[in-house]
Amino acid sequence: MPLKTDNSESTVYFDMDESLKIFNLDREESLKISRMWEEARQPENNIHIHDFVLESWRRSRKYNVDPKKKQNTALMDKRQLEQVKKANHKLIEVAAPAMHDLYKITQKTGFSIALADKQGILLEIVGSEKAKKFVAIGNFIEGSDWSEEVMGTNAVGTVLKIGRSIHIFGYEHYCKSACLCTCSASPIFDENREIIGVLNLTGPFNLMNPHTLGAVQSTAKAIERKFKLIDLYKQAEKSNVLRKAILESITGYLIVFDNNGRIIQHNEAARALLDIDDNIGFDFRKHIQKKNPSLMKLISRSKAVYGETVNFKTPGGLNKKFIINVTPLKTETNGEIEGHVISMTETHNVVRTIMKPKADITFEKLVGESSAFKYALNQAKLSATSDSNVLLMGESGVGKDLFAQSIHNAGPRKNQTFFAINCAAIPRELLASELFGYDEGAYTGARKNGNPGKFELADRGTIFLDEIGESPLDLQASLLRVLEEKAVVRLGGRERIPFDVRIISATNKNIFEEIKNNHFRHDLYYRIGVITIHIPPLRERKEDIPLLAEHLMKSINLRFGKEIRKIDPKVMDILINHKWPGNVRELSNVIERAISMAATPVITSDLLPFELQQKNVSHGGVAQPLWEETPSRAKAEAHLIQNYLTKFNYNKTKTANALKISRSSLYRKINEYKLLLSN
């Protein structure tokens, strides 16, 4: 019996019972989507409809598409479908590996992945049996025509009309039989920017996620790049040099071998990874049989393999996970198999490619010449050469995060993942799941199929735990256990997942006082503080202020597109004498404010914050000499004297009076520091 949508005579024009059963969809939510489909077509509706959807609805009415049709009836027979597939065999062959890679990521979600030709005919569908069964209810099957002329507004047909990636949700479909679906689709272009196909991701409406469209777009782009690589490979067949260059340009590991197992081509990455002989003709199968029988078993199938995960040991004895694709090498004349191509990608590289967690700062970008800063810098550089855990201590704003990134980038993990977690910024109840991950059903609102934590995602990389002193005691206990066992158990899960991660922590608190007051576990401190580095506050390295101010001025100039060329000597005096409770972060904010408001190429005192201007006024317009307030530092003293010389147009008497030193002392210091005596 048809389902009622409300208490009126309006009814659903299709039987959704079977759809509900497949994925245990909520009946009330399904009815709600169905009612939205009807309401969206009423003039007085308050539902937002995208302009491209409205235009598609108009075209669909023009095509006389029946919105009440129960399912697609434009189906090809077996012979017709074979002909269409034959005509699109290159598209299918190139797209298949990418579709299976995408399925590897989405296989537990309920989505199905479909490839359509430029006419809207479905050529291939990849998905679980449940996913295929769900879409098959509306005849979303191989050989069906999903152009707008047949099925009205839908992801495949509408992409072919407008030529760009789109998402079609539930009630936006023109035919009500598709209203329980959410679809994301992207066009596949050839080198002339002509559409040759469409990649589509379809599932039940409750799987709607803004990230699915990005996944489909990325996969479609990968298919387009594969076409380009194929064209390049054909052009390079007559040139061994060019062929080798193409192989080396491919990201990952690639090996080509003939039917006898002899290597035809390989890139250097594969040679190093698998410890194979560099000579062409090397017996690859015999070598792999000894080293990694699991990989040998996979490549012995004599057929295409897409997205298989294989564990094997590298020459260094490390266990690594790889996603493997094996493609038969066929001749163009008769289609006979002459060998196979193996492409391999490390699974952790997928994380780095999609999430792109990385560190941008290196030691070369850290500015400072003071002895206190150099001591901390040298400690950090030494720590980078080891794999021990590091604890960075210092006030807020001293640059602990910059030190953490620099240590990572100078160490053996520099090409791996770098995750930064602020333990004070993430709500207490979410911090554990962020670090350790969770399984499905771990708590109310947990994502279906669970979610990996940062320790899993950062495997072989670095995790930076900022403000670790703010973490609650119960989390500290869990963190201690994870670090001791070098394995994590997701919240709500049972499986121990080993990891290889370096920990860099930071705190602005007195960690020893925190331990004394029972706010921080001493045993956790011993774990994270194998190497402890104190980063000095700016007030203890005032001789670095001129260097930092100049450096910040240049970098902020680039960011804002400004051309501030100079800092007024009076301003530099104020900067040197300020206490800087906010440290380098505060100094950066002061310079940025001044550059933002500057109307001339010089930063003057009127551009400084009010409290800094007041301090200047209290000193009678001239800051107190640096050496009367802090111990003398040669670099700061030289910079200060040069500023005063410039300020008083190189008048030695005025300069000496302002500095409250004798003319003879001034001349001695000018000679000592080799200062400029004129413009």
Image (cartoon, rainbow, N blue to C red):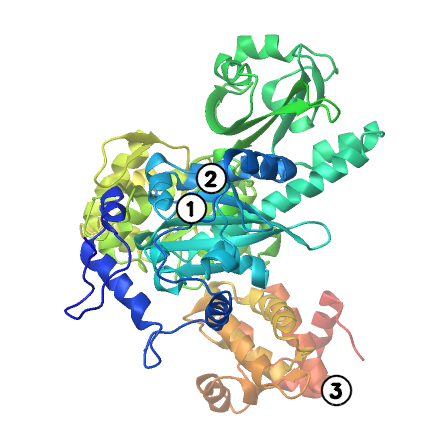
Residue under label 1, please give it: 140
Q: Nearer the viewer, residue 504 or 495?
A: 495
First-in-chain label (3 vs 2): 2
- Residue contact between numbered discs 2 and 1, judged by CB atoms under 8 Å: yes
The amino acid sitting under disc 3 is: Asn
Q: Nearer the viewer, residue 556 or 675?
A: 556
Q: Tell me if mark 2 has few (under 14), some (14-19) or many (20+) residues whose alpha carbon lies within 10 angstroms of its own.
A: many
Residue 19 on image: x %, y %? 27, 47
Residue under label 2, please give it: 125
Q: With 186 as the anchor, is 426 left or right in this view?
A: left
Residue 143 on image: x %, y %? 50, 41
Q: Nearer the viewer, residue 7 or 599?
A: 7
Q: In which image quadrant can residue 333 be found?
A: top right
Q: Quadrant of the C terminus?
A: bottom right
Q: Nearer the viewer, residue 130 or 442?
A: 130
Say what secondary structure mark 3 lies in: loop
Callout in the foreground (3, 1): 1
The amino acid sitting under disc 2 is: Ile
Q: Is residue 507 above or below residue 646?
A: above
Q: In which image quadrant can residue 68 be found?
A: bottom left
Residue under label 3, please give it: 649
Residue 170 on image: x %, y %? 35, 60
Say what secondary structure mark 1 lies in: loop
